[in-house]
């Protein structure tokens, strides 16, 4: 039987005078635990590995999927614990051995990737990541009976051309616990919209991941440096309070890089869904995740991080 709520909170960054989130994020939250749990003390025991290089596409540190560099952790402001970078056929990610979920997942999507002949595999091949050791990864039993979906960060439907690439999206390292009414509804609508943009534009880069966020941390009068959250299963898989997705378009027609950042609370949303209500500034997201998501963005394009969010048409 999975169990929720054995870790209570993580150390957060106290933000003074921060830009408010454009969502109504203070609505219902996942089940909270009873005990306070700060972030792991060590942020230096990071292992970076490129697993299975002989059988996977040749890449350098995942730049096939993250052309502007893998997201960079702000280890001065916060602790992340031990992590590993894994590079796969269709995505790369940085996995947290403490939380048993990815910090981020990068994809490079082409029109061919999302318009192939492969449907959803049956049965779906959910599996623990074979490149991660027992004890530092999520297991199938962690999700069983938890009430949360195994939420793909790089979706299976993004890979409809190469069977191996699709199968690899089912590793639990590519997943995080998502409320069913998020995963199967508005989050799916966002994933569908991203694929429509890929078809229209020819290619896109997408960075997806969890966010642990408490609006109380925005004010010095209510902040305490902790973000309450739930965990599930014997391995205590962390349940994010929110999820983010950054959609990045490479330069074209004389224009520079473009980016859109979405944040959604880990809960259900009321129909009809309004994706524009989930847009945030990329700079807002980076400050609250502790990640520089586009670390090698050309200086001429850095304004997109501060740009007012507008949904692509």
Image (tube, rainbow, N blue to C red):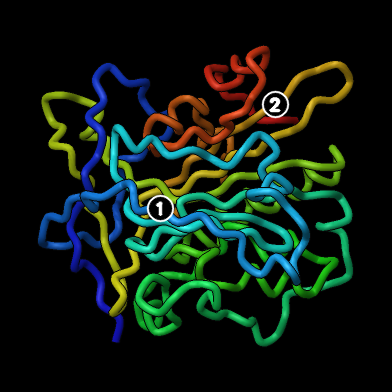
Residue 287 point in image, percent of width and height: 39, 29
- Mark 1 — residue? 46
Q: On the image, numbered disc 2 is attached to which residue?
A: 258
Is residue 266 depicted above or below 249 in this figure?
below
Looking at the image, tell me whether mark 2 or mark 1 is earlier in sequence order: 1
Left or right side of 161 for 165: left
Residue 16 in the image: state x and y as whole percent: 24, 20
Q: Residues within 10 Å of mark 2 (few under 14, many from 20)?
A: some
Position above or below: 163 against 57: below
Numbered mark located on residue 9 in the image: none
Measuring 13% from the left and 31% from the top, which residue is drawn there? 222
- In the rendered view, would you say 113 is above or below 44? below
User: Could one spot residue 165 in this view of the protein?
Assistant: no
Quadrant assignment, res 207: top right
Quarter of the image for the C terminus: give it.
Answer: top right
Q: Which residue is found at the position 61% from the left and 60% from the top?
A: 50
Residue 184's image quarter?
A: bottom right
């Amino acid at each position: 039987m999975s169990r929720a709520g054995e870790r209570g909170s993580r150390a957060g960054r106290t933000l003074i005078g921060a830009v408010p989130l454009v969502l109504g994020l203070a609505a219902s939250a996942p089940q909270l635990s009873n005990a306070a749990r700060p972030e792991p003390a060590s942020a230096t025991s990071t292992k970076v590995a490129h697993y299975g290089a002989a059988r996977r596409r040749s890449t350098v540190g995942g730049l096939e999927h993250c052309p502007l560099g893998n997201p960079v952790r702000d280890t001065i402001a916060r602790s992340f614990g031990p992590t590993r970078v894994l590079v796969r056929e269709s995505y790369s990610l940085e996995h947290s051995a403490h939380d048993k979920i990815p910090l981020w997942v990068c994809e490079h999507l082409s029109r061919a990737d999302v318009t192939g002949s492969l449907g959803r595999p049956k049965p779906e091949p959910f599996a623990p990541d074979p490149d991660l050791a027992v004890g530092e990864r999520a297991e199938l039993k962690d999700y069983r009976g938890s009430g949360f979906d195994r939420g793909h960060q790089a979706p299976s439907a993004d890979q409809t051309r190469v069977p191996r690439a699709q199968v690899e999206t089912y590793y639990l390292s590519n997943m995080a616990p998502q409320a069913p009414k998020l995963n199967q509804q508005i989050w799916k609508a966002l994933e569908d919209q991203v694929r429509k943009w890929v078809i229209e534009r020819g290619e896109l880069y997408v960075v997806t991941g969890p966010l642990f966020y408490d609006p109380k941390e925005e004010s010095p009068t209510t902040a305490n440096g902790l973000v309450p959250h739930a965990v599930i299963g014997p391995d205590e898989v962390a349940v994010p309070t929110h999820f983010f997705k950054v959609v990045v378009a490479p330069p074209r027609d004389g224009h520079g890089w473009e980016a859109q950042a979405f944040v959604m609370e880990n809960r259900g949303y009321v129909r009809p869904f309004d994706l524009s209500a989930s847009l945030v500034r990329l700079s807002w997201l980076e400050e609250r995740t502790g990640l520089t998501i586009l670390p090698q963005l050309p200086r001429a394009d850095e304004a997109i991080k501060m740009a007012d969010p507008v949904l692509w048409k």
